[in-house]
Amino acid sequence: MAVADTLRLAIAQLNPTVGDLDGNVALALDALGTATDGGADVVVLPEMMITGYPPEDLVFKPGFLADVRAALEKFAAGSGRTAAVIGFADGGDPSSGDVWNAVAVCAGGKICGTYHKRHLPNYDVFDEVRHFRAGQEPLHLFEIAGISLGVTICEDSWIAGGPVAQLAHGGARLVINVNGSPFATGKQQLREAVIGRRVEEAGVPVVYANLVGGQDELVFDGGSFVMSPSNEGPVVIARCRSFRESLDIFDVTVAPAPDVGNTSSGGGRSYPCIQVTPPVTIERAPILPPLVEPLGELAETWETLVVGTRDYVTKSGFSKVAIALSGGVDSSIVAAIAVDALGADNVHGILMPSRYSSDHSVTDAEQLAANLGIETSIVPIEPAHAAFTDMLVPVVSDEKIEVGDLTDQNLQSRIRGMVLMAMANEHDWLVLTTGNKSEAAVGYSTLYGDTAGAFAVIRDVWKLTVYELCHWRNEQEGRDLIPRHVLTKAPSAELRPGQRDDQSLPPYDILDPVLRAYVEGDKTVAEIIALEIDGADPEMVRRVCRLVDVAEFKRRQTPLGTRVTHKAFGRDRRIPIVNRYRG
């Protein structure tokens, strides 16, 4: 009777940077060295590890593709007895313009073979049909440490009866799936459910290895895992940490090889097999796999915002940031995220009180800064406000600017934007903006004012979720890191006397459900009215949805921010600016 075999597997969750070919290869070689020292038979590195993901239109440059090939060959030259599976962009013949999302299997100082992604996602944040050709070459296997393996890429594992099942039925005893899968709420559970279905079809273990780190508005959350068949159905036998670079080495048991040839009992089909490394002939003490518990939803969201902020700032070449501290909940959570991402010494709070600022707006901001341990500067805007008002009076239609009217409100916000950008220029800071998704949805912001900056940390976080995250973060700290008064006072822009958000907008506990239905649920006005959301009368629904439509031009001119939901503004939701549909 055949005996099950063991493969010593290393999963390298790494954080490459798009275009940093030398840096990415250095990361990969370091992981390969560690895996080799740990006795791994194979190390699995993520999708597009050489290029960073997504490389977008860089793949249209023949020179870039030539440099990618050279980088891959440099990596392969550093390989030895431990095989390595690594993602790259395969340019093939530069004159053809064809590019494939590919993986290479390397060992013994050479590239032993490649695989081209066969199924290209073209939904949500993905534009792979624009950038790549689908792989069409015949499938084949790789024999590593005496075990026949199949290799696939990301979307290939989401296809019922697709490459994963085909490779298994053609002789693979384990299938490796490399990924550049970005975070959205609930994504880890979805991945594991999908891979469970592939394991049921294939009858062999599937390795799911994911990127980690931020790239522009995307965050890749790691959470790599291995799922294996069992008598009770597919089971996760290994799970790596989320949101952290890591290299985990452990043993995976695979089913015995079939008695005849390299075929399965199901199909009797056999794919060609490339010999990569010889069988292991020595006895080895077993290494148990990691099995990290998944994070809760609020913890996942917080980690996403921290990683997205950290990597956008540092990968852009900055180390320090500035934030306008108003004493409100939005600027408070952005400051707390920034401190977790970059350290308190690298976060600077700018307080810019006006003639309308309440006493608590300053004291709450100062208390927050003290709690976080960040430096602050106070720059009152009254002198500039008065000067701009006097300057503009002769050229406005009625030769006056009404106290607290829309022109006056926007003027204050734009003055603050100028102060922030001037200080950022002077000190080489990057400005983080503080608007949330609810405000972005309805355009409750000032172009070139509170939207001025480089990165919108909570752009994809609804206002009600902002409060939930603040309470969660305080619980984790065991104290009111974000002052209690910030979380209990009525939200206000404080741009006119006695102003509150709910004087211009419905209360957020009514507004957010309507916005979620319209923005994330893609429902029409009539469909939302039919939902009968508590407190949302038909006229209010029509008004809110109209605000979303007319604010599209604002959103196109505001900074990108970390994607948290499955339908973020920008990559996910693409609506025409000029748009007369009122459904």
Image (tube, rainbow, N blue to C red):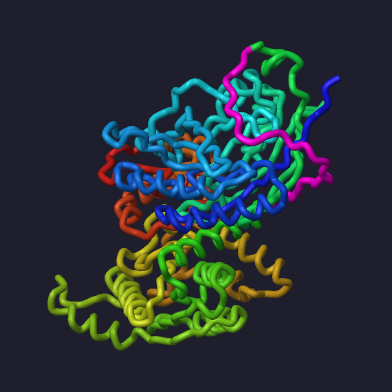
* Image position, residue 498 (x, y; %): 45, 75
Instruction: Check if residue 439 falls in the magenta segment.
Output: no
* Span colored in magenta: 269-296
Against 272, residue 229 (above or below) is below
Instruction: Report whether residue 148 is seen.
Output: yes
Instruction: Give me the residue at 69% from left, 35% from top.
Output: 145
* Image position, residue 299 (x, y; %): 65, 57
| Quadrant in which the C terminus is drawn | top left
Instruction: Give me the residue at 37% from left, 57% from top.
Output: 443
Residue at the far top: name it.
268
Instruction: Report whether residue 462 is seen.
Output: no
Against 489, residue 512 (above or below) is above
* Image position, residue 161 (x, y; %): 59, 20
Instruction: Give me the residue at 38% from left, 86% from top.
Output: 380
| Front residue of 469 and 394 | 469
Position of 236 with respect to 191 (left or right) is right
Position of 16 with respect to 429 (left or right) is right
Instruction: Check if residue 270 falls in the magenta segment.
Output: yes
Magenta segment main secondary structure: loop
Position of 40 with respect to 579 (left or right) is right
| Quadrant in which the N terminus is drawn | top right
